[in-house]
Amino acid sequence: MKTYNVNVIDANHMEINGKVSHPLWEKAEVLKDFSSPWNSEEVESIEFRALHDGTYLFVSYRVNDDSLHIDRTDDSKKSVDNSDRVELFLRSDKQLDPYYCLEIDPLARLQDFMARPNREFDYLWDWPKKDIAIKSHITSTSFSVEMAISIDALKRFSLIQNDGHIEAGIYRAKYNQQQNGQFKPTWITWVNPQTETPNFHTASSFGKLKLENFKLSKKV
């Protein structure tokens, strides 16, 4: 599996503002290894970073894009689903039973749901609001998203393995206007799932986030 190392930082020092501007982000590895295996067009630059302080997993995306498509109908999950966005899927096991999907648009709106194999999606499920914070920022040429996800929630959902790694899918959906005026998404991923058609909802699209100096405490 592809592996990204999540470096550790001192607790209570990180603050997210949506701009990926905090000095601590300089301690993170920069992941740029994204592609669209089902599309021949070149993918605009995407930078993913992650850090942890033992209490929170901090994740950021910085995406080059000067033609954002945002569905502003309302703040529903459906509007997010029709918008440019970044995505983070987290799985509890290789059987994807279950896995959790976090999809965030440039306005920091969240489409979250729990899923099981064969695209069984539970859109009524929500990631606990007390366990996640999201901020974003838009410029004329890009947008960025930051998340702080509590380690406690990752433990409760059995998403951290004994050796301190998390199995995750890191994705992007870019909507482009077609000649008929409709918008069609280009699907972009860190791990090529080797599928004939775009599919993030498969075990082969996941990689590994390895948390530095972190191990699950043994139950007494």
Image (spheres, rainbow, N blue to C red):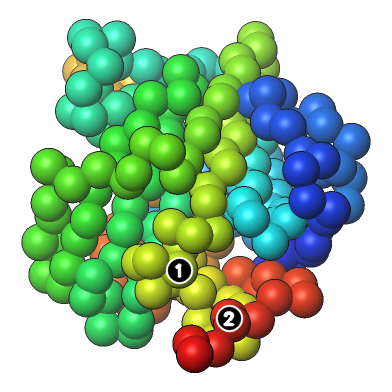
Q: Which mark is residue 155?
A: 1
The residue lying furthest to the front in this view is 220
x and y percent of residue 82 in the render? 26, 27
Above-or-below relation of 93 to 147: below
Residue 157 visible: yes
Q: Residue at x 24, y 70 (%)?
A: 98
Pointer 2 and pointer 1: residues touching (CB < 8 Å)?
A: yes
Q: Residues within 10 Å of mark 1 (few under 14, many from 20)?
A: few
108 horizontally vs 16: left or right: left
Q: Residues within 10 Å of mark 2 (few under 14, many from 20)?
A: few
Reading the image, the residue beneath label 2 is: 216
Above-or-below relation of 136 to 194: above
In the image, what residue type sits under mark 2?
Leu
x and y percent of residue 110 in the render? 36, 32
Residue 44 visible: no
155 horizontally vs 72: left or right: right
x and y percent of residue 14 in the render? 77, 39
- Based on the displayed image, in which of its 4 quarters is residue 97 positioned? bottom left
Point out the tag, 2 or 1, that comes first from the N-terminus.
1
